[in-house]
Amino acid sequence: MSEEPTNEHIKLYDGIAAWYVETYYNDMSDGEWLDVFCAAISTGSTIADVGCGPGQYARYFRLKGFEVFSVDISSEMLRVGKALDPQLRPVLSDINQLPFEGGSLDGLLIAYTLEHVKSEEIDEIVLELSRCLKPSGVIALMVKCGTGRYRFESSVLPGTGGFVQLWEPRGLSSIFEKHGFSTLMIRKKPPVLREEFLHERGYVLLRKNG
């Protein structure tokens, strides 16, 4: 991803970390999709939640028997998350250059992270995610559905903002398939929270070929 958008999102999420925890930390409205992801990989597998915010899903994954790394670009999000969950394994990193050895992960959760990836940059991101996965590794995507991209200003922290890239799940799955993945499942559901700007939620489950 280009430097300027990445930096503006770091500033945004560092600044709204406390609000984010209060609003989303206990939200399990995507719990059924987490269950689908977990059912596709073996207990004891190593996974990474990339774009995890404060890492609110880490406890859930540990209870399911997985080793989990919580990855985010915001050091403040990870700091707050570690304070709430001392067992959190935080990793400060951007999605475009993950600090994992090639073929070291069994699964990747990418939950609403691709909304900050421009459509013209998605191919390089898919290649990086694929690099980290073992053959037959699984990726679970959650996205805001739609087409195009728009900018926003934060109502929580005036003077900050960023962009939201919308994705159609079927088109996104085709991009992953082009880079050696098979699509296992695609789902959509209506927005749940008032902060979602009426975007449908999209879900894509993929397996790396091999």
Image (cartoon, grey):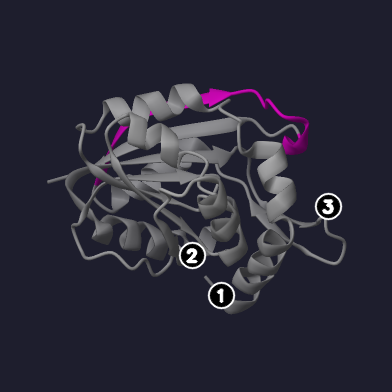
Eye-nearest disc, 1 or 2: 1
Question: Which numbered disc, 1 or 2, marks the residue that appears first in the sequence?
Answer: 1
Q: Around disc 3, counting alpha carbons within 10 Å, would you say few (fewer than 14), some (14 to 19), or many (20 or more)?
A: few
Specify the quadrant of the image occupied by residue 17. bottom right
Location of mark 3 (residue)? 156
Using the rendered image of the protein, determine whether residue 208 is visible from the camera's viewpoint. no
Residue at coordinates 54% horizontally, 58% vertically from top-left?
78
Residue 101 lies, with reference to residue 46, above or below; the image says below
Element class at badge 2: helix
Residue on which disc 1 sits: 2
* Sequence-earlier tag: 1 or 3: 1
Residue at point 21%, 41% (across, down): 45
Picture coordinates of residue 197 (x, y %)?
76, 37
**Residue found 27% across the figure and 33% down from its top:** 65
Q: Say which quarter of the image contains residue 147.
A: top right
Q: Where does residue 178 sit, x and y in percent of width and height? A: 30, 50
Identified at 60% across, 37% down, the residue is: 145
Alpha carbon distance from label 1 to label 2: 9 Å
Figure quadrant of residue 96: bottom left
Where residue 35 appears, as percent x and y from the top left, is 38, 24
Q: Residues within 10 Å of mark 1 (few under 14, many from 20)?
A: few
Residue at which label 2 appears:
121
Does residue 112 appear anywhere in the picture?
yes
Which comes before the other along the chain, label 2 or label 3?
A: 2
Q: Amino acid at mark 1?
A: Ser
- 119 relative to 61 in the view: left or right: right
- Residues at circles 1 and 2 in contact by the CB criterion of under 8 Å: yes
Q: Which residues are magenta?
A: 181-197
